[in-house]
Image (cartoon, rainbow, N blue to C red):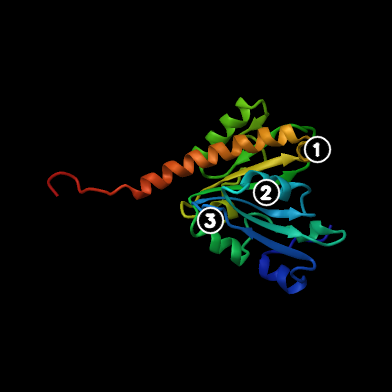
Amino acid sequence: MKKEFPNFAALKRAKEENKDYCVVVRPALDTGTALVMTPHGGGIERHVSMITAAIADGDLDMYCFEGMQPKGNAELHITSENFDEDRALELLKTKNTVVAIHGRADEGDADTIYLGGKDADLVVAINEGLRAAGLKTKGSGHRFPGTKDSNIVNRGLTGKGAQLELPLSLRKRLAKEPDLLETFRGAVRDAMLALDTDRRKQSDEPSFPAAGK
């Protein structure tokens, strides 16, 4: 396999936008401070663009970096820690609540969603929602912790986000089973919207000086 590009600038020098790859930015109807994204969409990690779009629907802002090559899209994979595409970084400047969707190999575990990222509150909320919906999750002890500051999901306003790694078999099921997709997307969306609403309210509340000051 070809060595991964170290950053977006290197990829941009070697590849042509709207031929080899594209960037999809879709604002929500009522743009808030929540964002669902994938840096590995299109042919890079199968079905993650579709899953990202399903979660976003019309209520959440969406960002997808997508491989468009007839084959060999894996070479367009930039690790999350190195992903620095300008439109993604600009969009993240306005976002409090960020979820990144990724695909992983089954590796003997075809059903479990691995959760990571620095936003502990969001990770817990999504984890609880997914488990309540009957889906399997794992929040630690896997190789995708997603806790580096440079990880694209942790580069929003709060410096933290939540990362979901979905096994290929589950992604295939989500693509073929509408009811399962609705269950999954509903659990993730509900957690994101609830937390983002709380954060927006808190940011709108006036702060008052302590007594005696």
Crowdedness near tag 1: few (<14), some (14–19) or many (≥20) residues, C-alpha within 10 Å: few
Give the SS element for disc 1: helix
Q: Quadrant of residue 24?
A: bottom right
- In the current view of this chain or complex, which residue is farthest to the right? 71
Position of 26 with respect to 13 (left or right) is left
For marks 2 and 3 on the same chain, the one whose residue lies earlier in the sequence: 2
Question: Label 1, on which residue?
Answer: 176
User: Which residue is painted at 42% across and 41% down in the image?
Assistant: 198
Q: Position of residue 116 (x, y in %)?
A: 60, 41
Q: Position of residue 48 (x, y in %)?
A: 72, 47
Sequence-first tag of 2 and 1: 2
Sooner in the amino-acid sequence: mark 3 or mark 1: 3
The answer to whether residue 200 is left or right of residue 98 is left
What is the CA distance from the residue labelled 2 to the residue labelled 1? 15 Å
Residue type at mark 1: give it. Lys
Pointer 3 residue: 155
- Position in image of residue 154 (x %, y %): 54, 52
Residue closest to the eye, 37 or 166: 37
